[in-house]
Image: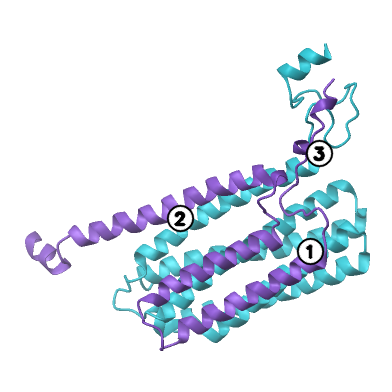
Amino acid sequence: MSHSKHGAHLHDTAPGEEEHEGVGGYVIGLGLATLLTIVSFVVAGTTWVWEPSIPVALTVLAIAQMGVHLVFFLHITTGPDNTNNVMALAFGVLIVLLVMGGSLWIMSRMNHNMAPMQDMMQMQR
Amino acid sequence: MSGISATADPYRIGHRGGSHQPTAEHAGGGLVSKRIIVGYGFWIFLLSDIVMFSAFFATYAVLVNETAGGPTGRELFDLRNVAVETAALLLSSFTCGIASIGAQRRLHDWYYGAMAITFAFGAIFIGLEVTEFADLVARDAGPSRSAFLSAFFTLVGCHGLHVSAGLLWLLTMMAQVYAKGFRADILRRLLCFSLFWHALDIIWVGLFSVVYLMGAGQ
């Protein structure tokens, strides 16, 4: 009855699973992750970079390394058999960004708008 | 009849067994193998775990400067220790991948060897973290010293608890394979374990970047 549906689209893979699993992917992932980690530690300790740029560089390196882990260790890829996993990941990333970005934004605005602590104490007297 | 039931229930939920269709992987109605369903469910759990960690990260980022006159991260953090911890966890993630390849190819030596090395690296990580915490408490920089340190111990300690639970799970998986062999249900649990272990390493990447490297460079 539904043999026509036996298309390529009916194929799914579980997260963490690769079609032709081999050591090669893990070796590439380990190499890239090691490289990014070393760069992170060097950037954090260096003095010949404009100082305010260091947190930004560390954030970018961390996100890149998380991507490497996702692709090479967890095998979350952009292939058609991985759509469900990627959609779940996208939703998770959305929530993470909302929670972290929202908290930081709100709290920094509150700190900005609040009178300094000494003034507050004097007002209470 | 089959045509009607296929349109009304394309994924054949509630039609387990008694089906005229072979229950092979990806049978006609779009039936998906149990391994994929289990993996997907565990992936959603991991994402919810990551959302929980994001709340701890946000708390830490908000409180990082509230040291109450106590020590700051710059005075406390030992980056050499953190580098060794990072290396241990990254290598354990790699050997965990080797172990899952070994399990899929039914290679007992590969599996047990790689799992044992994964455990050793994980234990090194936990050992270093416990020593670091004990050292901080001894230097009067425990979790009750300041809001910054409360947030630090909560965030890093929660990750450490996850790794400890992962180590127990790792031993359980070794024992289960020893007792029951590479059965399909055991292999599904093994898939979940390796996803868990790799996800812990992803969280550690955020942790050493945000907490230790940014903290030490303040």
| Image mark 2: chain | B
Q: Amino acid at mark 3?
A: Ser
Give amino acid for label 2. Answer: Ala
Q: Secondary structure at mark 1?
A: helix
Q: Sequence order check: which comes first, mark 3 or mark 1? A: 3
Which amino acid does the dot numbered 1 rest on? Leu
* Residue B77 appears anywhere in the view: no
Chain letter of mark 1 equals: B
Secondary-structure class at tag 3: loop
Which residue was labeled with disc 2? B55
Dot 2 alpha-carbon crowd within 10 angstroms: few under 14, some 14 to 19, many 20 or more: some
**Tag shown at residue B33:** 3
Give the letter of the chain under mark 3.
Answer: B
Residue A113 in sight in this render: yes
Image quadrant in which you'd find residue B201: bottom right
State the image coordinates of residue B27 (x, y, percent, origin top left): 84, 31
Left or right: B41 with respect to B48? right
